[in-house]
Image (cartoon, grey):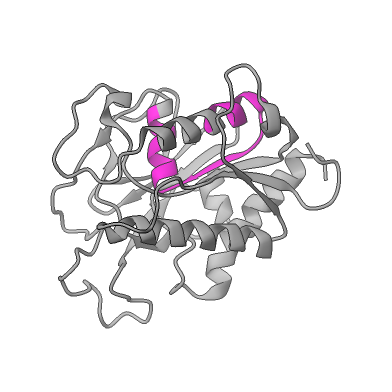
Amino acid sequence: MQAHGSPRIGVPVRLSSSEGADPRVGKANHLFELIVELLRQAGAEPVLLDSLVEPGNGGAVRELDGVLLPGGGDLDPGLYGEEPGPELYDVNPAQDELDMSVAKAGIAAGIPVLGICRGHQLLNVLYGGTLIQDMHPSPVVHRVVAGEPAPDPEHEWAEHSWAWHDVGLTAGSRLAALYGGSAPSVRIASGHHQAVARVGNGLLVTAVADDGTIEGLEDPARWVVSMQWHPEAASLPEEQRLAPFRAFVEVCREAGGG
């Protein structure tokens, strides 16, 4: 860990190419780049991780002050004991291995770990939870399907690729602290077709949508936090985009003794 200077935050790279038939892969890769840039703007030194971290040997992770697990394609359902359904996209075993190895190493090293979207789902599975492979329609719109109109066209933040809705935050949670600690809810950019089903062992639910969808989790025994939404969405006001990343960087700075 760094005793001074910018906190070094590890981010596993995205392994799937944007050149393909599914535009969601290209979008996920673009969001990865936005996250890396926001970490820089927030005062961190992003460290891109492109190789597996062997169990019991943290390697480069031991030199980090934190880990951020970004969005991307769907996890292999075999990781939570299910057969794959027809709605999955970009299932990449190499990506699963990389992300899982980084998450495990970060948790073992005792450094802060933040999961966003796929990272939220991955942490739940790592803790023994399961996922809804494809969500049924509900009163809360969680994603905009290509060819359909945006659900909230009058909202100033509305853009075609995102659904927008509120999530309630648990007072006193680490997740709420990333958003200043006082707001009971936050308006978020949503684009997921999967969600947490059974919550992983020992995790607390810290954010919920109005339809009951679990949007945030954390481990009360260590700084492991996740959110289902996309705080990096470019159509959010700039200060709102930066705020949770600044807060996470400060958590990593304090954890690293900087």
Q: Residue at horizontal 42%, vertical 42%?
A: 120
Question: Toward which corner of the image does residue 235 lie, by quadrant?
Answer: bottom left
Q: Residue at horizontal 84%, vertical 51%?
A: 5
Q: Main secondary structure of the magenta part?
A: helix
The percent coordinates of residue 68 (x first, y second) are: 56, 45
Which quadrant of the rendered structure holds the N terminus? top right
Looking at this view, name the residue that lies furthest to the right: 4
Where 99 sits versus 116, above or below? above
Q: Is 48 or 100 nearer to us in this picture?
A: 48
The number of numbered badges drawn on the structure is 0
Which quadrant of the rendered structure holds the C terminus? top right
The percent coordinates of residue 136 (x first, y second) are: 13, 48
Q: Residue at horizontal 86%, vertical 47%?
A: 4
Does any portion of residue 216 appear in the rendered image?
no
Q: Is residue 109 magenta?
A: yes
Q: Is residue 238 left or right of residue 213?
A: right
Q: Is residue 8 magenta?
A: no
Where 240 sits versus 205, above or below? below
Does any portion of residue 210 appear in the rendered image?
yes
The percent coordinates of residue 192 (x first, y second) are: 29, 53
Question: Toward which corner of the image does residue 107 lie, by quadrant?
Answer: top right
Q: Is residue 78 left or right of residue 40?
A: left
* Magenta residues, start to end: 103-125
